[in-house]
Amino acid sequence: MTPHLPNPPKRLVVVGNGMVGQRFVEALRARDADRAWTITVLSEEPRRAYDRVALSSYFDGADAASLDLVADGCYSDDTCVLHLGESAASIDRAGHSVLTTTGRTLDYDALVLATGSYPFVPPVPGRDLPGCFVYRTLDDLDAIRAAAEHAAATTRGRRSGLVIGGGLLGLEAARALRLLGMSPHVVELAPRLMPLQVDEGGGALLRDMIEALDVTVHLGTSVARIEHGQARDSRRMLATLADGTELDLDLVVFSAGIRPQDGLARDAGLALGARGGIAVDDGCATSDPAIFAIGECACIGERVYGLVAPGYAMAEVLADRLLGGTASFTPADTSTKLKLMGVDVASFGDALAQTEGALEVTLSNPVDRTYAKLVVSDDAKILLGGVLVGDASKYAILRPLVGRPLPGDPVAMIAPSGGMPSMSLPPDAQVCACHGLTKASICGAIAEHGLTDVPGIKACTKAGTGCGSCVPLLKTLLAESGVAQSTALCEHFAQTRAELFDIVRRDRIATFTELISVHGHGRGCDICKPVVASILASLDLGHILDGEQSALQDTNDHFLANIQRNGTYSVVPRIAGGEVTPEKLIVLGEVARDFQLYTKITGGQRIDLFGARVEPLPAIWRRLVDAGFESGHAYGKALRTVKSCVGSTWCRYGVQDSVSLAIELELRYRGIRSPHKIKAGVSGCARECAEAQSKDIGVIATENGWNLYVGGNGGFRPRHADLLMKDIDTATLIRTIDRFIMFYIRTADRLQRTSVWVESLSRDGTDGLQYLTSVLVDDSLGIAAELDAAMATHVERYEDEWAAVLDDPERLRRFVSFVNAPGAPDPSIAFVSERNQPRPVLPLLGRGKALEVLA
Amino acid sequence: MTTTIHAPLEAIRSADWQPICAYADLTPERGCAALVGSLQIALFRTFDGSVFAISNQDPFTGAYVLSRGIVGTRNDVPTVASPLHKQVFNLATGACLDDAGVAVTTYPVRLSDGVVQVLAA
C-alpha cells in the first residue's frame, strides 16, 4: 500500500478587498476545511473591506470600525493574508504571476479579480477643480467632510453642494450632504429621479418627497461648466447648468454612475464585454481558465451588475467551483426595495414595461403621497413587474408574484385597502427574500411547531427578521393556517375593551393601576393605556390630564393637539355646525398669522392650524379661549363635528333648520370619549348637501320631522349609513342618538368605527340594524334608562378641556420642548415657504435603516 | 422609592455627567426631552421609579418625538412606543422590539442629590 501524501496547497491571489472580494474569501474559507488553498488578498485602499452600501451613515454617527465587514479571525494565520495599500500592476498570464504596485511578484494557481468599479465623471469643464469630489470610498467621504467643515467655518448663511446624478447613488450622496448640514442640489440628465428603477409617475412623487427634505432637484439638464467663485480668497464655486441656471456652491459631488474596473484585465488581453466589464461564464471564469472575475468588474450573461446581491451570488458560485463544485450563476433579480432619505421606493421585475405589449396599471394618490404601478402582460393575466413609491408595503406580496398569473384585479391589488387578504400566494412563492423562505416552508413551520404569532415565526424561521417587509404577509399566513386570533386586548389584558368597560363601571375603578393590578399584568402599553384612559373619560372620571390618567394618554390627548409628521402639532378649535361669526374668523386668522401656522379648511367645516411646537400651544389657546373658542377634540377619539348645510333659514329648498339642530347636537355630545372618532351630519332636505349618510350619525330633514341614519363611514372603507328611524320629532331623535352613542361606547371594540360595530351586532338571524332598533327603541335589554342617565351626566359635567388647562399651572407644566431648557424651541423643527405658507422640512433620519438593497 | 442607575461605568469622572433636572420634575410613566449640547435626549421615569435615557429621535421617521410616547412594558421589559407609528423600543437597550435591525442610542443616567444626570459625550 502506497502512503497517501496530501496535495500541497494551491496558491490563490485575490485582487480587490471590496464587499464582494471579502465575501468570496470568507465563503471559500468556510468551505475549504482542508485548506486546499492559501490565499493572498491585495487591497488598493488602505482599509480592509467595509460596507459601501451604508456609506452615508458615516456622517450619521457610524465610524469606519462600525462599517467594517471582515469576520473575526479571517486573516489571522499565514494561509490567508491581506495586504493593504497594495494593488496589482500587471498580470503575467503565461508565467501565472501578478506584479504588484510595490514591486513584488506573486505566483498563482488561480487568480480572482474583484476590482469593483470606479465612479464615472462626465467630461464637464472644471471637473478637476479643488472642491470637486466623487462618492465611492471612505477617503472620498473624509475629503467631502473636510470641505464641508471648511465651508461651515467660512460661509455665512446656507451652505450648498451640488450632486451630479439623480440615481440611487446620487440620492445617497445628497443624504450625506444633508447630514453635513448642507442644502444639496441634485442635477439629473434624465427627466426623472432614479431613471433606472422608477417610471415617470413614481419619479414625480419621489421628487416632491425629496424636495420636502430641502433638496433642490434639477431634471432634464446637465452641468455645462464649473468655475471658481468671484471672491478671490474664497473656495466657493459657481456651476452653470445647460439650461442657464447658475448655482453658488461650496462643493460638487460626482455620482453619475459607475464603470467596471477592467483595466488590469484589458491590459492582460482577457476578453471583455461589449460595453466593458471582464467577460465571464456562469462559473465566473474569464477567457483564461486560471483567472476568474466576480462583482461589479465582471460582465456575466452580457450584464454588469451594480448591486451587491448579485456580486455576493457570484462569490458563492466561485467558492464552490474552486473546490470542485458545479454551482452556476443564474441571472439575478435586480428588484430593489429601499428607503431613500426616509422615502420608501421599490422596483421589481420589468418595472419600466420594456416587455413587448406590456400594459401598465397605475394608481397615483397625491393626498397620501403614494404611487403604485403594476406592469402586466398584453392579455393582463401575468404580472411582469412594478414600481412603488411612498408606500412599499406591498412589495413583499407583489415581488414573489412576478412571472405568475395575477390572482385578482390589478387595480384592486395596488388599491390602498384592496385585494390583499383574498390573494393567496402559491406554495412555492418566496415570502421572505432576505432568508429565501417560501410560503410552503413558513406554513410548514407554523404547523410543525404550533406557532401562533409573528414573533414566534421570526424566532423559529428567521422570516421577517431581515428587512421586515414581509411581516404583514406573515400575519396573513397565520390566518390562512387557521391560527385563531386572540380577542385579548393586548399582552396586559386578556379581556376585550367591552369587558374592561363593564369591569370599570361595575367595580367603580378609578385608576389604571387599580385595574391592571387586579385584572391584568405588567404596566400596560400603547394599546391598553389609551383604551383605559378613554373608558375612564367616558365615565366622566375627571379631567383627562389629571393624576395618573395623564400618563395614559396618547401624545395627542397629552398635549390636546394633533401630532404631525415633523413632531409639531395642529390646533382645531370647535366651530359647531360650521357656523362662525366674522369676528371669530378674524381671530383665527390673526392667531395663525401671529404664530406662523399653516392654515387649511378641514372636511368637517372647521379650520386647522398646523405647525405649532408644544411651547406656544397655551399662548395660542389663551387667545382662542378669550375669543370664545373651545377645544374641537380633533385630537381625541371623541365627537369631532356635526356638519350641516345652511338649511331652511336661507336655502330655498330647505324644509328644516339643519344648522340649529347641528349646533345643538355638537354642543350636546362635545368632549365625549368613545372607542373611535364619531362624526355626524345634518341635512336640511333630501338633497343631502351635508353628506350625512357618510357619517356615524346622519340626520336628514323631511316634511314631517327627521330621518335618522347610523353606521355610515367615509375614509378607508366607505359605507352608507342605514336608516334607523323615519319622520321622528326632535326629542325622539336626540334621545335615540344619546342611546346609540352610549351603547357604542359600552360595547364596541378598540378603534372600531360605528360602521363595523353595527355590522358586528347581528345575532341569530337578525341583522345589526334590527338588533340595534330593538335595544335603542324597544329597550329589549332594559338598559335604556341607564344609557339616558349616562348621557345626562356627560352633558351636565362637560367643561372645555383647554380652558381648564389654561387655569392650572400644574397642567401647563408639560408644554415645554425641553425639561432642562424650558424656553428653547426644538431646533429640529424647520419650515420653508410654499404658496405663502409654512411647510415643514423633515429632519433627516438618524441611525435607523440607511439603505437596503435586496435581491 | 428605589432608583436604579443604568450606568455600567464606575470610572467615569463626575465632571462628565450633565445635570438635567430634578428627579421630582419627571412624571411617573411619562417621558420628557432634554437638550444636551446639540443632542436631544428622551428621559423616562418608569412605574418602579427607574430612570432611562435614550435618543429622542424616532429612527423610522426622523422626527424628535420619542419622549412623547406611551411608556409601558412588553414581557416585563420597560418600553416606550413611538407616538408617530407606534414602534416599541426597549428603554434599557434602545432596541426596537418590532424591527430587529433597528435601535436607538441609550445614555447612562444616574441620580445625585435628587438631580437626574446623564452621560452624553
Image (cartoon, rainbow, N blue to C red):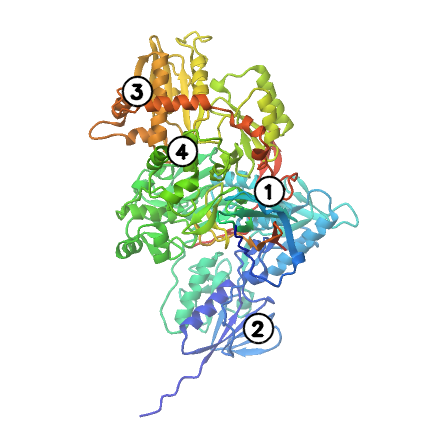
Quarter holding the N terminus of chain A is bottom left
The residues tagged by marks 3 and 4 sit, at their Cα atoms, a distance apart of 26 Å
Residue in the foreground of this view, choosing between A410 and A624: A624
Tell which subunit mark 3 falls on: A
The residue carrying pointer 1 sits among few (fewer than 14), some (14 to 19) or many (20 or more) residues within 10 Å by Cα, namely many
For marks 3 and 2, the one nearer the N-term is 2
In the rendered structure, are the residues bearing label 1 and label 2 in contact, judged by CB atoms less than 8 Å apart?
Answer: no
Residue lying at the far right in this picture: please name it: A232
Which circle, 4 or 2, is nearer the viewer?
A: 4
Secondary element under disc 2, as helix, strand or loop, is: strand
Q: Are marks 4 and 2 on the same chain?
A: yes
In the rendered structure, are the residues bearing label 3 and label 2 in contact, judged by CB atoms less than 8 Å apart?
Answer: no
In the rendered structure, are the residues bearing label 4 and label 2 in contact, judged by CB atoms less than 8 Å apart?
Answer: no
The residues tagged by marks 4 and 2 sit, at their Cα atoms, a distance apart of 68 Å
Secondary element under disc 3, as helix, strand or loop, is: strand
Q: Is residue A178 visible?
A: yes
The residues tagged by marks 4 and 1 sit, at their Cα atoms, a distance apart of 46 Å
| Residue located beneath label 4 in the image | A535
Residue A724's label in the rendered image is 3
Q: Are marks 3 and 1 on the same chain?
A: yes
Residue A215's label in the rendered image is 1
Q: Which quadrant holds residue A210? A: top right
| Residue located beneath label 2 in the image | A83
Secondary element under disc 1, as helix, strand or loop, is: loop
Residue in the foreground of this view, choosing between A378 and B120: B120
Whether residue A134 is situated above or below residue A765 in the rendered picture: below
For marks 3 and 1, the one nearer the N-term is 1
